Image: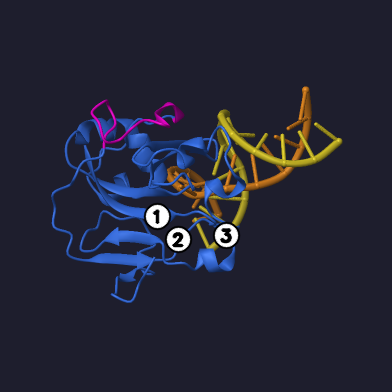
Chain colours: A blue, B orange, C yellow
Amino acid sequence: MTFIRKVEAYRPNDSACHGRSGVTPRTAPIFGPGGHAYVYLCYGLHMMLNIVADKDGVGAAVLIRSCSPVTGLETIQERRGQKIDKPLLLNGPGKVGQALGLSTQWSHHPLYSPGGLEVLDGGEDVEKVLVGPRVGIDYALPEHVNALWRFAIANTPWISAPKNTLKPLTSTHSS
DNA sequence: GGGACGATCTCCT
DNA sequence: GGAGATCGTCCCC
């Protein structure tokens, strides 16, 4: 089990979102019911886990960028092939996918009911949230590259680099 | 049916 | 800091 530490938002009419080209067999989950998983293969080797954040079938999702282990540390270390207990173990979306043993079969899987892959309330007080621009989407429109749609929990080392672009969330920030 | 590309990671310099 | 790995998906012939 892991605690989600850092996420990125991908929205409708977002030039960086996989749903930007409409519905395809791969991206269909994004346009499906919210709370379902969207897992896809990136660069032929990395399984990326997304949570569909969509209510109206418009296509929106949240990419899980980093986690911290809660239980099953040994299993995670075995899957990652690294006997370490540091952020390096889970500080990237591809690493999270590997640590959870994901495959594209998990796409469409509901995350709000028991069944192997599930998202729960962490029950931890999140006092501060950091925001920053997303990374790895150089192909997107400038206004989408610069949009502050990357979110991380403050005061934890278990977040993926780069951290220096993250700033505390202010009340002026809106969706 | 074929080719180009990608929400990344790792190793090497 | 930079480039290669590696393959499913999508678009165009």
Which chain's residue wears label 3? A
Residue annotated with mark 1:
A8
Q: Residue at x 47, y 59 (%)?
A: A135
Residue receiving disc 2: A134
**Residue A46 in sight:** no
Quadrant in the rendering for residue C5: top right
Regarding mark 2 in the picture, which secondary structure is present there?
loop
Percent position (x, y) of residue A48?
43, 41
Is residue A108 located in the magenta-colored stretch of the structure? yes
Chain at numbered mark 1 = A
Magenta stretch: give its range: A104-118
- Residue at 52% in and 64% down: A145
Real-space CA distance between mark 3 and mark 2, rounded to the nearest whole angstrom: 9 Å
Labels 1, 3: front one: 1
| Residue A100 in sight | yes
Judge by depth and name the residue closer to the eye, A119 or A53: A53
Determine whether, in the image, residue A70 is placed left or right of residue B6. left
Residue type beneath disc 2: Arg
The percent position of residue A11, horizontal first and vertical second, equals: 47, 54
Q: Is residue A19 above or below residue A1?
A: below
How many neighbours does mark 3 have within 10 angstroms: few (below 14), some (14-19), or many (20 or more)?
few
The tag on residue A138 is 3
Q: Are marks 1 and 3 on the same chain?
A: yes
Instruction: Indicate the position of residue A72 as horizontal and vertical percent values.
Output: 19, 33
> Do callouts 1 and 2 mark residues in contact (Cβ within 8 Å)?
yes
Which residue does the image show at 22% across and 59% down from the upper left? Answer: A156
In the image, residue A103 above or below residue A175: above
Q: Residue at x 13, y 57 (%)?
A: A125
State the SS at label 1. Answer: strand
Name the spot of residue A170 as percent of width and height, x first.
29, 74
Lateral position of residue A40 relative to residue A154, left or right: right
